Amino acid sequence: MFELMRSISIDAGDGRAAGVAFVPAEHPLFADHFPGRPLLPGSLILELAAQVAGPLAEEFVKTQLDLERWAILGMVRDARFLQPVFLPASLEITAVISRSQSSNVSTNVTVAMDGERVMQAELVMMMLESSDEWTAAIEARNERLARWKEASS
Amino acid sequence: MSARDTSAEVAMLVRQTLALPESEPILPEQLFFYDLGFTSMDLLDLLFRIEQHFQIEIPEGTIYHLARGDLAEAEFAEDAVLTEAGRQRLMALLYDTPPELFPARVHATTLPRFCTVGAITRLVDHKLACSS
């Protein structure tokens, strides 16, 4: 399984979350990106940031708005890729809520490597009501999330 | 037109949202969803741009609350569908939207779909007036 997150901690009351991801160089996904010089694609950096921002948004609307929602990345605004991320890499990801409504939550995310920012963006998470066909996906995600939280405690 | 020409500034933000060239005319009577091909994400993006540019807040449900005005909630909508009185209130607020576009049953979550560029400009003027 291609699972890159290692740990996550969420403080919904403060609207903040932090996570750590480790990306190996050997995964076949990076064989062509690029041969002999594996580089993490920007889209995957954004995905890792969304894996921190999403659970934060869900816990935030649950505790602050009393809503059960499933966060899906809807919009990326003002993304800046500040440094190339050569692999292997350990990434520190932070997300801070900047705006919240029942239908969407905006988060300012920062991804750093060895203390240096490599990416910053505003991620808008769309907060959807889950339906029955999502049950298995939500359970699997929650199982992963519980492991990541355990690893950070 | 307001002193700061809100209309031109909103048109500029619409162009930025859709990545249109400056030469592309954006007219007050154009409907976001019907004429400009907006999606709901485009509208959200535009509202963020408007909030940032004008330093105002447009929370979700703004069109709903402006249309409802002093009408009691139960008289305005039932089970998230506008009553006939609610529908009339909405049509009065969005007076430059062709009346035939409003279906008999207007769901409360769809109200931004009926907005023209002019309606959003009026909303911005209203918010600016409230904040000054």
Image: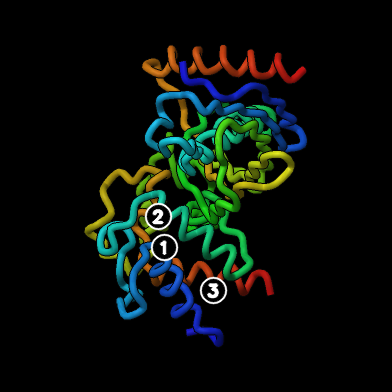
Give the residue type at disc 2: Asp
Seen from this angle, which residue lies furthest front?
A36
Q: Reply above or below: A145 against B4.
A: above
| Frontmost residue, A129 versus B88 | A129
What residue is shown with label 2? Answer: B42
Q: Nearer the viewer, mark 3 or mark 1?
A: 1
Whether the residues at callouts 1 and 2 have beta carbons within 8 Å, the answer is yes
Residue lying at the far left of the rendered structure: B100
Name the N-terminal-most of marks 3 and 2: 2
**Secondary element at tag 3:** helix
Measured as percent of width and height from the top left, residue B6 is found at: 50, 78
**Residue underneath mark 3:** B125
Sequence-first disc among 1 and 2: 1
Q: Nearer the viewer, residue A16 or A111?
A: A111
Question: Where is mark 1, residue-wise?
Answer: B17
Viewer-nearest residue: A51 or A30: A30
Position of the C terminus of chain A by quadrant: top right
Q: Dot 1: what SS?
A: helix
| Identity of the residue drawn at 52% across and 20% down | A3
For the residue marked with disc 1, what is the amino acid? Thr
Is residue A73 visible in the rendered image? The answer is no
Spatial distance from mark 1 to mark 2, Cα to Cα?
7 Å
